[in-house]
Amino acid sequence: MITVVTYGTFDLFHIGHYRLLRRAKSLGDRLIVGVSTDEFNNKKGKETYQPFEERFRIVKSLPFVDIVIPEVSWEQKINDIKEYSVDIFVIGDDWRGKFDYLSIYCKVIYLPRTKGISSTILREKIRNSNKGSNIIGSFCI
Ligand code: CTP
């Protein structure tokens, strides 16, 4: 059995996430996904729209995801790889080179990102549409 692992925040789950996870699963038999906790995101300086619980539940509901675990630190990857006997570590190519150090434990694969979509873009759109509604609101008043 080939076990694949990947990690991410998966805020405002979008088609780029879907494609990445589907391709990750196609590389093996079992897909484990680490979802970054809100505390870990704070450390990374990332503020999500959705809290951990929602992001975790959505990833868990996907038919090609077998196990979901919280990602709480940069360091846990090596432990996870050992604990779950991971064969392949997968992540989008925005991280190219950053996880090469894991190649002594398992195969490391960087998959091409889906172009034109990201959680950052979606958060920005929500922010702008909220600004718009505030303006309309204040005109109404
Ligand atoms: N990903 C992808 N294509 C995209 C966006 C993300 O393949 N268009 C991949 C990332 O490379 C990563 C995984 O999905 O392997 C989770 O990425 P995440 O950082 O949660 O998503 P982003 O949309 O990149 O989030 P942000 O804009 O907050 O950085």
Image (spheres, helix red, strand yellow):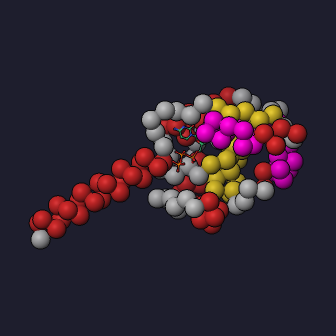
- Furthest toward the top, the residue is 26
Residue 61, given in percent of the width and then of the height, sits at: 57, 46
Residue located farthest toward the front when viewing the structure as drawn: 97
Is residue 134 visible in this depiction of the protein?
yes
Q: Is residue 83 magenta?
A: yes
Q: Given the current orientation, which residue lies at the most extreme bottom position?
A: 141
What's the residue at 68%, 50% (across, down)?
A: 34
Residue bounds of the magenta highlight: 78-99
Asked whether 114 falls inside the magenta stretch, the response is: no
Q: Quadrant of ligand 1?
A: top right
Nearest to the observer: residue 92 or residue 85: 92
Image mark count: 0
Q: Residue furthest left?
A: 140
Provide residue 58's location: percent of width, then percent of height: 54, 50
Quadrant of the snapshot with the N terminus: top right
Q: Residue at x 87, y 41 (%)?
A: 105
The structure residue drawn at horizontal position 36% and vertical position 54%, both measured from the top left corner, is 126
Query: In the image, is 66 to the left or to the right of 122?
Result: right
Q: Position of residue 30 (x, y in %)?
A: 74, 37
Residue 3 lies, in percent from the top left, at 78, 37
Residue at 77% across, 35% down: 108
Between 90 and 21, the one lying in front of the other is 90
The vertical placement of 105 against 26, above or below, is below
Q: Nearer the viewer, residue 41 or 54?
A: 41
Quarter of the image for the C terminus: give it.
bottom left
Q: Is residue 108 left or right of residue 85?
A: left
Quadrant assignment, res 101: top right
Residue 30 seen anywhere in this rendered image of the structure: no
The part of the image, by quadrant, that contains residue 89 is top right
